[in-house]
Amino acid sequence: MWKCPRCKRTFANRNQTHTCGLHDLESHFRDKPPEIRALYDAVLAAVLALGPVTVLPEKTRIAFHVRMSFAQVTPKMGWLDGHVVLARRLEHPRFRSIQTFSPRNHLHTFRISALADVDDDFRAWLAEAYAVGEQRHLP
Ligand SMILES: [Zn+2]
């Protein structure tokens, strides 16, 4: 048995994928059009394809966490705003800003306004961020 250190729930497998129950995931979507939930579900499916993930619904955002949070989204009325954490600066027209916190910690903000935005580029960024979340980029 494994006990999640955050929500204290127990699971059969270590780092079991689950939604940590500290805040209510549904509250992010209660006042939003159903299209926004569909965008989130597409992002979530892309995240879950990478491996075990803890989904952390927080007050203003939903974070995706392995050993550290590597991506997050904030549902808005017409789109999802979010970011991925990459170990390098990656210039791309779809990144709205890049904030550098350390040489190996760069926060890249994006906006998802259509299902087509969850494409191969986006999946590649998520995969790269997931490796950062696992801290595999560290020596
Ligand atoms: Zn938990």
Image (cartoon, grey):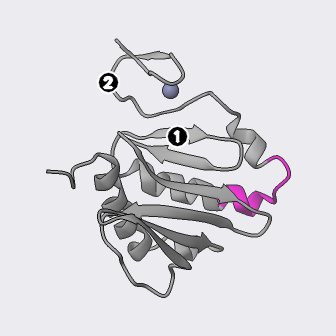
Q: Quadrant of residue 23 in the image?
A: top right
- Helix, strand or loop at disc 1? strand
Foreground residue, 88 or 54?
88
Q: Which amino acid type is marked by label 1?
A: Val
Name the residue at the bottom extreme.
Answer: 93
Residue of label 1:
55
Mark 1 neighbour density, 10 Å: few (under 14) some (14–19) many (20 or more): many
In the displayed structure, 65 sits above or below 113; it is above
Residue displayed at 31% across by 54% down: 132
Q: Which amino acid type is marked by label 2?
A: Arg
Q: Residue 87: give its label.
A: none
- Helix, strand or loop at disc 2? loop
Disc 1 to disc 2, how far (Cα)? 15 Å
Residue 28 in magenta stretch: no
Q: Provide the residue span drawn in magenta.
A: 30-38
Name the residue at the left extreme.
Answer: 139
Q: Is residue 82 left or right of residue 28?
A: left
Residue displayed at 44% across by 57% down: 46
Residue 137 picture location, percent across and down? 21, 55
Mark 2 neighbour density, 10 Å: few (under 14) some (14–19) many (20 or more): few
Residue 22 picture location, percent across and down? 63, 28
Residue of label 2:
14
Residue 112 picture location, percent across and down? 60, 71
